Amino acid sequence: MNIGIVYQSGKSLLGLIEIPFMTRQNFLILPNENKTNDKAPDFNAMVRVAGNFTQLGGIWNKTANNEKKTQYKDLTIEHPFVGKMYLKMFAAKDDEIYKDSKEVDRKVLYNIVYSTPTKREDDNQFATAQTQYRQQEQEHNGIPVVHVDAGEEDELPF
């Protein structure tokens, strides 16, 4: 299920997540300049609370264990009502546009996808989440659903 996007605004990367029955959540994506080991996130997802930024979650660069070695991002966030959410970020199509609150067109860089947790391994979760996203996209456009193989993905422009 596609629940959000990442787009560029000036020099900043911004995320937007809309969880059904919850409020829209905007967040800022910053490189993790204090990364001390390989398990630490590559980026921090920050949210403004009472005028100050606090960490909402972390983002890790990942490579799928598939034929094309597809690049994607893992996003883990802590939500006060939902708990920990494990999300995937897939590169958006070149022509995807988001109209922000000031009616300015912003190019979508990533789509944020939620997939129901399973006991599958990470690479299978990646394939499942990406396939579900592509199928939902096709259904939304009235195109019959077919299996879609993972494609090449772009890295964040830092």
Image (cartoon, rainbow, N blue to C red):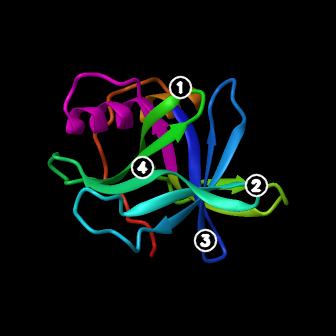
* Residue found at x 57% / y 57%: 46
- Measured in 3D between alpha carbons, the distance from the residue under mark 3 to the one under mark 1, in whole angstroms, is 32 Å
The three-letter code of the residue at mark 1 reads: Glu
Q: Magenta span covers which residues?
A: 111-133
> Where 6 sits versus 2, above or below?
below
Label 1 sits on residue: 139
Label 3 sits on residue:
12
Q: Are marks 1 and 4 in contact (CB under 8 Å)?
A: no
* Residue drawn at the location 51% of the way across and 47% of the way down: 111
Question: Which tag, 1 or 2, sits closer to the chain's start?
Answer: 2
| Crowd around label 1: few <14 · some 14–19 · many ≥20 (10 Å) | few
- Can you give x and y, in whole percent of width and height, for residue 87 in the image? 43, 40
Foreground tag (1 vs 2):
2
Type of amino acid under label 4: Phe
Q: Disc 3 versus disc 2: distance between alpha carbons?
A: 20 Å
Q: Residues within 10 Å of mark 4 (few under 14, many from 20)?
A: many
- Looking at the image, which is closer to me, 83 or 99? 83
Compare marks 3 and 1 and give the one earlier in the sequence: 3
- Tell me which amino acid carries mark 2: Ala
Which quarter of the rendered picture does the C terminus lie within? bottom left
Q: Which residue was labeled with disc 4? A: 90
Mark 4: secondary structure: strand
Q: How many marks?
A: 4
Disc with the residue nearer the chain's start (3 vs 2): 3
Q: Is residue 124 left or right of residue 78?
A: left
Disc 3 marks which amino acid? Ser
Q: Position of residue 125 (x, y in %)?
A: 28, 33
Q: Distance between the Cα atoms at labels 4 and 3?
A: 18 Å
**Residue drawn at 50 percent across, 40 percent down:** 78
